[in-house]
Image (cartoon, helix red, strand yellow):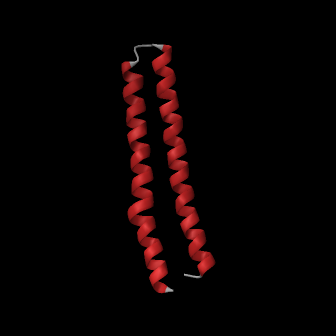
Amino acid sequence: MNSISTIMDNIDSYIVYPIFFGLAVIMFTYAGILYLTSAGNPGNLGKAKEAVIWGVVGAIIGVAAGGIISLIKTIVGA
């Protein structure tokens, strides 16, 4: 059982959080660039707003994925 716990911890630490939060940071950076280069254009401002929303969604999914891994570890008893 200890090896399952170790595998789950490694997945959580080295795969789930870095990927999801890295993508969220990229989305927020992209949204910031869109906002700064929009020059008041409503279409580009809307794209920037959507990028921020998707960045938040990505961060929430990352937290949920970590929570699911913790739940699986609790169910398995690891």
**Relative to the observer, which residue lies in front, 11 or 25?**
11
Residue at point 41%, 65% (across, down) = 13
> Residue 14: x percent and y percent?
38, 64
Residue at point 41%, 71% (across, down) = 10
Left or right: where does residue 27 sit relative to residue 69? left
Residue 67 position (above or below residue 74): above
Residue 14 position (above or below residue 1): above
Left or right: where does residue 35 sit relative to residue 1? left
> Residue 48: x percent and y percent?
46, 27
- Where is residue 36, by image quadrant? top left
Judged from this view, the residue extending furthest toward the bottom is 1
Residue at point 40%, 43% (across, down) = 25
Judged from this view, the residue extending furthest toward the right is 75
> Residue 71: x percent and y percent?
60, 69
Residue 40 position (above or below residue 63): above
Looking at the rendered image, the quarter that the C terminus falls into is: bottom right
> Residue 16: x percent and y percent?
45, 59
Residue at point 53%, 56% (across, down) = 63
Q: How many labels sit on residues? A: 0
